[in-house]
Image (cartoon, rainbow, N blue to C red):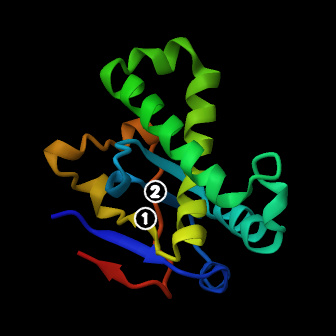
Amino acid sequence: MTVLTGFVSLKEIQMKKSKTKHSAVSLAELGINTVVLTPHVNIEKIFKKFENEPDFIWADGKGKNFLYESLLETLKDEDSVFTKSPEIAEKTPKRWLNFMDDCVIFAVLHSVVKGQPLRLLHPSCFTNPEPKMKLSIDKTEGLIPDLFSSIPCYQ
């Protein structure tokens, strides 16, 4: 069973105070297999930028929708590279970090542009992962994502 959490608004993010302050962002529904563990504050900053900045500042004046389509294709390509050859992440750590950062940006952009909840994995996916999910606490240096108390969980 895969358990997802999701949130809709910045206000809900600000209501939650957590110990670890990390979320596991999932883009699996969009064809990107990589899960990124990121601090809540990163998500909050990105939401604020996308919600408050004018559309014309994104993608050299082409806007958020153009940025969305461009990022989606790029991230799918990068995800397939890292999925097929995980050692590339170790050989090119800057590329890997940029990819993970872009995944978080894209997840928030998807939520804003499409008006859909941001998909966050439930902490149990890390502590009791399904074999096919390949999630491991070892890969996150012991960090486990935290729940937002005001956000409903979906199964």
Cα separation between marks 1 and 2 = 5 Å
Q: Residue at x 78, y 54 (%)?
A: 58
Q: Amino acid at mark 1?
A: Leu
Q: Amino acid at mark 2?
A: Ala
Q: Residues within 10 Å of mark 2 (few under 14, many from 20)?
A: many
> Which residue reaches farthest front?
62
Q: Residue at x 73, y 66 (%)?
A: 50
At which x and y percent is residue 91?
Answer: 52, 11
How many marks are shown on the rendered structure? 2
**Which residue is identified by label 2?**
24
Mark 1 falls on what kind of element?
strand
Picture layout, residue 8 above or below residue 79: below
Q: Quadrant of residue 144?
A: bottom left
At which x and y percent is residue 137?
Answer: 37, 44
Q: Is residue 2 left or right of residue 61?
A: left
Q: Is residue 56 left or right of residue 137?
A: right
Q: Are marks 1 and 2 in contact (CB under 8 Å)?
A: yes
Picture layout, residue 127 above or below residue 102: below
Q: Quadrant of residue 16?
A: bottom right
Q: Quadrant of residue 125?
A: bottom left
Q: Residue at x 84, y 68 (%)?
A: 54
Q: Is residue 60 left or right of residue 100?
A: right
Mark 2 falls on what kind of element?
strand
Q: Residues within 10 Å of mark 1 (few under 14, many from 20)?
A: many
Looking at the rendered structure, which numbered label has been put on residue 120?
1
Comparing 97 with 49, the one in front is 49
Q: Residue at x 22, y 63 (%)?
A: 2
Looking at the rendered structure, which numbered label has been put on residue 129?
none
Q: Can you say which quadrant of the picture contains the N terminus?
A: bottom left
At which x and y percent is residue 45?
Answer: 75, 64
Q: Earlier in the sequence, mark 1 or mark 2?
A: 2
At which x and y percent is residue 143?
Answer: 48, 50
